[in-house]
Every structure is written in structure tokens, then in C-alpha cells.
Image: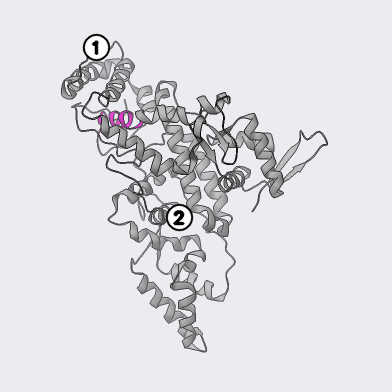
Amino acid sequence: MLNIKKQLVPQNNKVTAFFPINTKDRKDVFDWDCVLGHFIKYCYRKQISTDNMSEFTKACKDAFELKLDVPEFWNEIESMYFQNDELYKISPELLLFKAQKVQGNSSNKRLGDFFLNLLQDFYLKEKSKTKLNFIENEIAATFEKFTITGSTAGTVTDKSKEAAYLPFLSEQFAKDLSFLNSKPKYFLNSITDFLRLYSFLYTAQIAINLDAWQQGEPTPKKCYFIMDNEKASEERTWVKEYGYRQLARNFEKVFPYLAMSESIQEPDTLKQPLWKISDSLTDSECLEDLNIYTKNFIDNRKLNIEFQPANSSREALKNLLSLSVQQFGKSESRYDVNVNYRKAIETELCAHFIQNRGRAGRVLVFNQDYVLLLTNLAIGIDREQLRFHELILEFEARGVFFDKQSQKVLVSFYERIGNVERMSDSGDAVYVRKTV
């Protein structure tokens, strides 16, 4: 049995594992620049020995003045690289300086830790190979003297405090990050969009998979999108039933389910997802405790529900999850808490992928920039192109689904930008190339 508390007592609702949103979060709570620095620290397992940019700047100045015939040229270098964001374009690892701004901001740290947990044990072992000029090489060499590297999680940087809720997505995340690392300039230009994309994909897939906790390890569930320049209509069944409406229905379970999951696990242990807890429950060990907890929870929350003891541990867990949702019902005092939580999910993690289409209502969309990013990630490191059908399967492995109508729009888009090749007159064999 996995980490089930020995003493189950109703407590305040809180979520500190598997999701980065807090009940007090409101619009624009995250500074993605700060989050990016935090992520770089984790994905390279590196720290910098100073949080003082001026100290690093002085070290660079000293290094250049030893090598330059005209020491005054330093002023030009400082203007070129240190008085704007050009410094961060030298190498992805220099983004570590952005991590220093994270300190003291709990919301940015939460989102940074969310990506750490998505990484699990993966990190980038190989340094990205960037073509640099003399000045940039000197800055990069000086920077290396300020870095502390640790190959073991939990030494130089933190270690994940939870098991993977969506192992399939963690696997894709690691693979796609490796691809970005192989293209340093593309990495620098795309990394924030990459993190926004995966924070949304995770949000969508955990919301849809939460209710499937009795079915074992999660798999990519249908979640349908359209292109942002595409017309939406009520007649498109897949988009209507398995698009935004599906997410909206499931967003209301995210906080109640994860709060209940956390409440039954021992603190200061590796947090386990509901589907793993379900697999480990035994009636002989915990049925009685879970039934007592159910009754106490009903009493503590003053719910107008008659207690019915469960006949199995899984049934007891199902009852507890249902009660956790019911405590946020419209007639309950906690109703607004979950309403605001759902709003924060949409505004902070999903806004780039949701549009209001008038009579058709809200739909999930991909704009052209995100389509190109997803396309390049899906084709990956070792391939230059993919058959369109295989590309669609790679999208679906990441939780992105398009119906036949949207697939036609996708092909037209690829043809317009010139990264598609037809290998037969019939048009059946359509290959899509990377753009980097």
C-alpha cells in the first residue's frame, strides 16, 4: 500500500502536487521569464555560484581587458551584450541568470517545480553545440567558471517530489526537449512557447484522465483542436464533444480530486497519482480506515448526504472523490473557491489555446506558430520528414487530435509554407519536412 496515512483526518483543501495552480492565483500570476530560468536550472542540473549579474559582468570585463589591445572596447561589448537580452542568446544555459528572479516568488517556483516533476529523472547531459564568435566564446568561457553542475538529482538542484501522473507525456517531453537542445538557436527562440505548450497539454490530459483512475496508467485521451484560421461549426461532432466542452467539464474535478488524493497520503513522501494509489489499495489494510474517513469528511464538511459504508477500498476511494467534488457544489460555501480555481486554469495555462467562436462557442485552437513548433518536435532529431499520417499519430501521442477537416487545412498550410512533398500523383503519400 502506497503512503496512505495511518491517521486519516479531514483537513483544509490544498494541492501541492501534480498541478501548479493555487486557489489564490489570479490572472497573470506567472512571470514566464522567471519560470524559464527555473526550468533551465532543472533541465541542465546546473546552478550559478552568484545571484549578482554585476559580479559576472565584472569577470567578463576583466577577461576581455587582458586580451583586448584596446581595453576601451569593453564599453562596446557591454552595450552589445549586457544592456539588453543579447546575452541570453549566446547559449541556453545563460538563461540560468533568469532563475535568480524566481527566488521569493512562490507562484513562479510552483510552475518551475511543475516542469521538474514533468522531467522526472531526465536531464540534458550534453551541452548544446552553438557556433559562437570570439566575443561570445569568451563570455561563455567566463560563464562556465560560475556554474556548478550535478549529475544526480537532489544535489545541485532539487529532486522531483512526485511520481509521474502522465508517464506518456513525460516521455514525449524529454524526447522533445532533447530535440530542442540539438538546435540551440531554435531552443532559444522557442523555449517559452515549448513550456507553454506542454503546460497546456499536461493540463488537458490530466483533466481528462483524472476520472479514469481505475483504468491504470493513463494514455493520451482524445482532445480535438482546429486551426485558428479555420471555421468552427456545431456540426463537427469530434470538435464539439471532445474539444473545449470536454475540458470545461473536467476542470471542475482537478482541484477536488487532487486535494483528496493529497489528503490521504503521508506528507513528506513521494506523492503518488490516484491511479497508482488505486492499484495498491487492499481491503484488509485500509477499507475500514477509508470508511471512517468518509463519515468524518461528511460531518466535517456538513454535507447533506447519508453515509453509506463501501464494500471495497476502491469503492471507498470513489466515494471520497465524489464527496470532494460535492463540497464545492453551488449550494455550498466553498463553491467560489473551485470556480476561481477553474478560471485560473483557463487564464494561466490554457489561454493561448482557447478561442470564442460566436455561435459555435469556445473551441480549442492551434495557431500557426504552435503548429510549426509541434510539427518540428514530432518529426524530431533523427528524421528530416514524416509521412503526414505518421505525423498525425505523433501529434496524438502528445494529446493533440485533429479531425479530417482540420487535417485537410493542415496539409494546405504546409503546402503554403513549402515544407510538404507529394510522393505520388494521387496525393496519398504526403510527406512533411521540418522547418529547422
Q: Residue at x 21, y 12 (%)?
A: 306
Q: Where in the figure is residue 359, as x and y percent of width and height?
A: 50, 30
Front residue (pair 167, 194): 194
- CB under 8 Å between callouts 2 and 1? no
Front residue (pair 336, 215): 336
Residue at mark 1: 309
Does the segment drawn in magenta span residue 266? yes
Q: Where in the figure is residue 380, as x and y percent of width and height?
A: 61, 46
Q: Which residues are magenta?
A: 254-267
Count residues near mark 1 (Cα–Cα under 10 Å), then give few for <14, some for 14-19, many for 20+: some
Identify residue type, mark 1: Pro
Please indicate whether residue 315 sits to the left or right of residue 95 in the image: left
Residue at mark 2: 44
Does the segment drawn in magenta span residue 33? no
In the rendered view, tell whether residue 282 sits above or below residue 364: above
User: Quadrant of residue 296 in the image?
Assistant: top left
Please indicate whether residue 379 sits to the left or right of residue 158 in the image: right
Q: SS of the residue at dot 1? A: loop
In the rendered view, tell whether residue 380 sits above or below residue 209: below
